Every structure is written in structure tokens, then in C-alpha cells.
């Protein structure tokens, strides 16, 4: 590049002016011209890195920051900006190290503390992220960006009221900050204040109409309000702005599946995992490959319930492949050995055998182009050994009364846990009926443990349930299972046992809407929240139905069977 006729300080001033005017390409050109004249001009290298970041050239920006730091290795602003670039490249541990180095040189650096909080949040070190934001705010109490991001991490910590307070404080400082209004909407959704969430998204979109994240989140709020067609219109607008926006595609897919539009729903949901694939082998999507080995797996991060629900497709895959290898969570390995069509089962984390094609279990409905009327719903498709049945039958005692299994909470780390899990205390009214109650919870939360300990009328085995084979053996000895939406429901359904499912007002997509049965599990009966979105009415209806169940059970028992 030809050298410039301006003095270097003048050229730098012109580059800075171009940057401030948003003329990033011009600023980049001037910076390169300066550096061609003087390779160790620190200010030009630093500005070049900032400009390259604006132009979306993160790798080039990182190289420029590194060149600048060879000249001034102890320059906190450069280390801070470098951390941000590393964050954009998803190199979070390196980003954290860059911020830590900046803060070691300059401890009272609020921007670096706030940025460090962002990286810790990405690493899911939420308490540390909160502490970093708080340190930034001690130095600068009116730091609106730190307040807004602090709200996000408080939301991650399920401290929603505090999160809302932090966002509202940020908005008193920057009332027209669209990103904070979007975050505030997300928090209000978690607090089930859906109309207010919608208003917050609308305000964000008034300020920034081309904001795909706010449009997608607005779609979620509309679906929370059962305004599904309006929600779909929001996803459509978001995708017109950003056609490759995977989150909006996925959210649209969940909405379509919930309303029964499986044709488009499966394909849209697949976007969530499009960027995830650590296999060199191609993905299998339904073709006949009689000479191929197909790996079916529980990635990325399927829940136990997902694995149990979709393993029903394994025998169908086996009809189209030479060999089926199934990789599942370790605690499901034993149970899956009863599934037809599997040649080899591997626990997650173990070495995989050779295979030709792969498919996530969650993608199998798409592979088979599943519609409501073609769901493979024959049960049972999982089974329990007769010896395990006998062993647990003896543990459960007399069958003089109906045996009722209870499950009231799922994985506490599930993002929807607060919407689907309940407290054991809520179910105590069921225990006054003439039945034997068995806890199907392996893990019990502290508050529930105290209640359970005080009750002698609930059998609880806890750590004696080594894996899902034990839970399946217990379920197979029960007359009825009552559960919130957790893996116990899927296990009972897969074993063809009667199961009553207590569902929130807006359920997970697989339970569809406004029906008391499930096309996935013929033995399931659904008890849904009404528009009060509370559990009281659900439990009253379950209690009434259980009274009838117990009465019917007693009427069908002969004197001989009652004595067993």
C-alpha cells in the first residue's frame, strides 16, 4: 500500500474521525496506510483492531490486538477489547484470562469487570458473574449496561424479582435502550406477567423495528397467551430480517408442533441442532441403507424423557439399516437393552464403534415424516425382566390396596422446571385415600425431603433406585402413576402403564392443546391447568378422579385377592 502524505498524527486523527462517522472501511484503509509507514504505531494497531471488529472481522481484529500488545503488553484497554473479541469467537476461557490480566493491571476498571461478568455468564459461572457486575457497579453505580447484564444473570439464577429491579434501574438511566427492554420482557415472561412482557417487547421494537431477537421473544410471549398465529407472524418477521436465525426457527417449530402442525414443525425444530455436529459421518434422515451401520444418539443434551419417548423409533430404523448402534445416557443403558432392533448399546462418554451414518433420537420424527396420525404409538416398547418385577413386588408389600406411584418434580436445571414441577406438600390431599403410595423420585429437594420424612404413608426408595431399570421395575408393579411432566411419565407410557399427567397451562409441545389423551402414549390421561395457571384446580380434579379409581379398584377385588 502506498505511504500517505499526511503526518502520522494527522493520519491517525483522520482515521479516528472516519471511525466516529461510521466510515469503517475508510478508517481501516487509513490505519493500514499508517502501519505500512510505521509498523509499531500502537495507536493505529489498536484502532485497526476496533475497526476490524466493527466490520465483523474478528480473527483479523484478534491478530491486530496481539500485534499491539507486543508493543504495549500492559495496556488494560487493549486487553479488555481483546477479551471482547475472544468472546465473540467463543474462546471464553482465553477471554476471561485477558480480562483478568487487564484487571490485575487496573483493578478499578468497570468496563473490564462488566465484560468479565459477560464471559463468566457464558461459562455458566453465574454467581461469579454476578459478583463481577456488582464490583463494576460499586465503581460506577450509574453503569446502565452492567445493570442490564446483571439482570440477565439474576434471571439465570432464577432470582426474577431482583432481575427485574436491576433492568428497571438500567432503564431509568437509559430509557430508550432496546436491548434492556428486550431483557426486561424475558424476565417478565419468567414471572408469568405476559401482557407486561409483550408491552416491553413492543417498546423495544418501536425503538428498533429491525430487532430479530425482540421479535422472536415477542412470539414466545404471544404463545404464552395462546395467541399462536400472532406468535408465528412474529417468527416470520424475525426470519425475514435474519433468515439463518436458528432460535427463531426453533421457536417457530415448537409452536407449530404444539398446535399439531407436524409437517413444518419437525423441520423447524431441527434448526436448534444445525450448528451442532461433532461427527464426520453424514446425518441419516430416513433413507433405506441396508448395508450401513447407523448410530442413534441422545445428543445434543437430550433429557431422559426425550430419550425414552423417541427410542420407539429404533425398531423402525433397524428395518432400514444393516446395524443399529444406540448411544444413550448411562442410567438408561440397562433399560434400553430391552428395545427391539438394537445391535449395540453405548453409554454416553464411551468410545463409539465404527458407523456410517448418524441421527439424533430427537430427529427421528423428522426422518420418518411423522404426523399426528402416523405416530408409532404401540406400547409397551420397553420391558422389565420377570426377576426384577418379582424382586420389587416383594419390596412393595401387600396388594390389598391400589399401588399409586407419585412424581412431583423433574430436573431442577431444566429451564422450564419452575413451570412444571410442584412441591410434595401440594399432593398431600391425595394421601387420605385408601391406597398405597410410592414415591418415584430418586432425588428429592430439601423442602420435599422434610415433608417426605414426616410421612409414613409414602414408600420412598431414593438411592436404592440405581438406574431407570429399577424405576421401571417399580412402575411395572403399580396400578397407576400420577406425575408432573417428567421422565417418569415417559417411562410409564413406554411400559403401557396407566399414567396421569399434570400439565401447566402452556405445556411442552408434545402434549399438544385442549385434549385429555396423548397420541404418543395410549395409557396416558392429561390433567391441565386452567387459565388461572395454578395447580390447585388440577389437584382437585386428580383427587376426584383418584377417588373413583380407588372405588373401582375395591369393587373389582375378590375376597381372595384382597388377602394377598
Image (cartoon, rainbow, N blue to C red):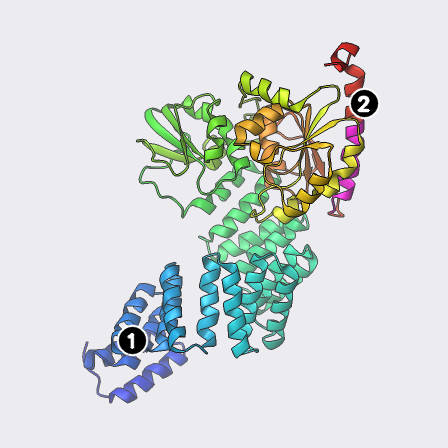
Which quarter of the figure is the N terminus placed in?
bottom left
Q: Which mark is residue 551?
A: 2
* Cα distance in 3D space between marks 1 and 2: 79 Å
Residue sitting nearer the eye, 423 or 280: 423
Q: Is residue 524 above or below residue 189?
A: above
Which quarter of the figure is the C terminus placed in?
top right
Q: Earlier in the sequence, mark 1 or mark 2?
A: 1
Residue sitting nearer the eye, 425 or 91: 425
Q: Quick check: 340 left or right of 564?
A: left
Q: Which residues are magenta?
A: 534-547
Q: Secondary structure at mark 1?
A: loop
Q: Residue furthest top?
A: 560
Q: Residue 458 at what x, y percent from top left?
A: 71, 33
Q: Which mark is residue 19?
A: none
Q: Quick check: 561 left or right of 58?
A: right
Report the residue marked by disc 1: 73
Q: Is residue 393 in view?
A: yes
Amino acid at each position: 500500500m502506498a505511504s500517505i502524505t499526511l503526518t502520522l498524527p494527522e493520519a491517525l486523527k483522520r482515521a479516528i474521525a472516519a471511525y466516529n462517522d461510521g466510515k469503517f472501511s475508510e478508517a481501516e484503509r487509513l490505519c493500514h496506510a499508517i502501519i505500512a509507514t510505521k509498523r509499531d504505531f500502537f495507536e493505529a494497531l489498536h484502532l485497526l483492531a476496533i475497526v476490524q471488529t466493527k466490520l465483523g472481522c474478528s480473527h483479523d481484529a484478534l491478530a491486530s490486538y496481539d500485534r499491539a500488545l507486543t508493543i504495549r503488553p500492559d495496556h488494560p484497554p487493549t486487553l479488555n477489547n481483546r477479551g471482547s473479541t475472544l468472546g465473540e469467537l467463543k474462546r471464553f476461557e482465553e477471554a476471561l484470562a485477558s480480562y483478568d490480566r487487564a484487571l490485575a493491571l487496573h483493578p478499578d476498571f468497570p468496563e473490564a469487570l462488566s465484560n468479565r461478568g459477560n464471559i463468566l455468564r457464558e461459562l455458566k459461572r453465574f454467581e461469579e458473574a454476578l459478583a463481577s457486575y456488582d464490583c463494576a457497579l460499586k465503581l460506577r453505580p450509574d453503569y446502565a449496561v452492567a445493570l442490564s447484564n446483571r439482570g440477565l444473570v439474576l434471571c439465570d439464577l432464577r432470582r426474577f424479582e431482583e432481575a427485574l429491579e436491576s433492568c428497571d434501574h438500567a432503564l431509568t438511566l437509559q430509557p430508550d435502550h432496546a436491548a434492556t427492554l428486550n431483557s426486561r420482557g424475558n424476565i417478565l415472561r419468567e414471572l408469568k406477567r405476559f401482557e407486561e412482557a409483550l408491552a416491553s417487547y413492543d417498546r423495544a421494537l418501536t425503538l428498533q423495528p429491525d430487532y430479530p431477537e425482540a421479535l422472536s421473544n415477542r412470539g414466545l410471549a404471544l404463545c404464552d397467551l395462546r395467541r399462536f398465529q400472532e406468535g408465528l407472524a412474529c417468527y416470520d418477521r424475525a426470519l425475514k430480517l435474519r433468515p439463518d436465525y436458528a432460535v427463531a426457527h426453533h421457536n417457530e417449530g415448537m409452536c407449530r408442533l404444539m398446535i399439531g402442525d407436524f409437517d413444518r414443525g419437525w423441520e423447524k425444530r431441527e434448526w436448534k441442532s444445525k450448528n451442532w455436529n461433532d461427527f464426520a459421518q453424514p446425518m441419516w434422515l430416513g433413507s433405506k441403507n441396508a448395508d450401513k451401520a447407523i448410530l442413534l444418539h441422545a445428543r445434543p443434551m437430550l433429557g431422559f424423557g426425550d430419550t425414552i419417548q423417541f427410542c420407539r423409533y429404533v425398531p423402525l430404523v433397524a428395518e432400514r439399516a444393516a446395524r443399529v448402534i444406540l448411544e444413550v445416557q448411562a442410567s438408561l443403558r440397562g433399560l434400553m437393552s430391552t428395545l427391539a432392533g438394537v445391535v449395540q448399546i453405548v453409554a454416553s462418554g464411551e468410545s463409539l464403534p465404527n458407523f456410517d451414518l448418524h441421527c439424533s433420537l430427537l430427529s427421528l420424527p423428522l426422518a420418518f415424516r411423522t404426523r399426528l396420525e402416523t405416530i408409532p404409538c404401540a406400547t409397551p416398547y420397553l420391558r422389565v425382566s420377570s426377576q426384577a418385577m418379582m424382586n420389587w413386588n416383594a419390596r412393595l408389600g401387600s396388594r390389598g390396596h391400589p399401588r399409586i406411584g407419585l412424581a412431583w418434580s423433574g430436573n431442577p436445571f431444566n429451564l422450564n422446571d419452575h413451570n412444571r414441577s410442584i412441591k410434595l406438600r401440594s399432593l398431600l390431599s391425595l394421601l387420605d385415600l385408601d391406597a398405597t403410595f410410592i414415591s418415584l423420585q430418586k432425588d428429592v429437594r430439601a423442602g420435599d425431603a422434610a415433608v417426605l420424612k414426616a410421612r409414613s404413608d409414602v414408600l420412598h426408595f431414593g438411592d436404592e433406585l440405581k438406574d431407570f431399570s429399577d424405576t421401571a421395575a417399580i412402575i411395572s408393579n403399580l396400578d397407576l402413576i400420577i406425575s408432573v411432566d417428567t421422565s417418569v411419565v415417559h417411562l410409564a407410557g413406554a411400559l403401557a402403564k396407566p399414567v396421569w399427567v399434570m400439565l401447566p397451562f402452556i405445556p411442552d409441545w408434545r402434549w399438544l392443546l385442549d385434549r385429555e389423551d396423548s397420541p404418543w402414549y395410549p395409557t396416558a390421561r392429561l390433567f391441565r391447568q386452567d387459565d388461572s395457571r395454578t395447580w390447585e384446580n388440577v389437584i382437585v380434579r386428580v383427587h376426584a378422579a383418584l377417588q373413583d379409581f380407588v372405588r373401582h379398584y375395591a369393587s373389582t377385588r375378590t375376597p381372595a385377592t384382597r388377602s394377598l
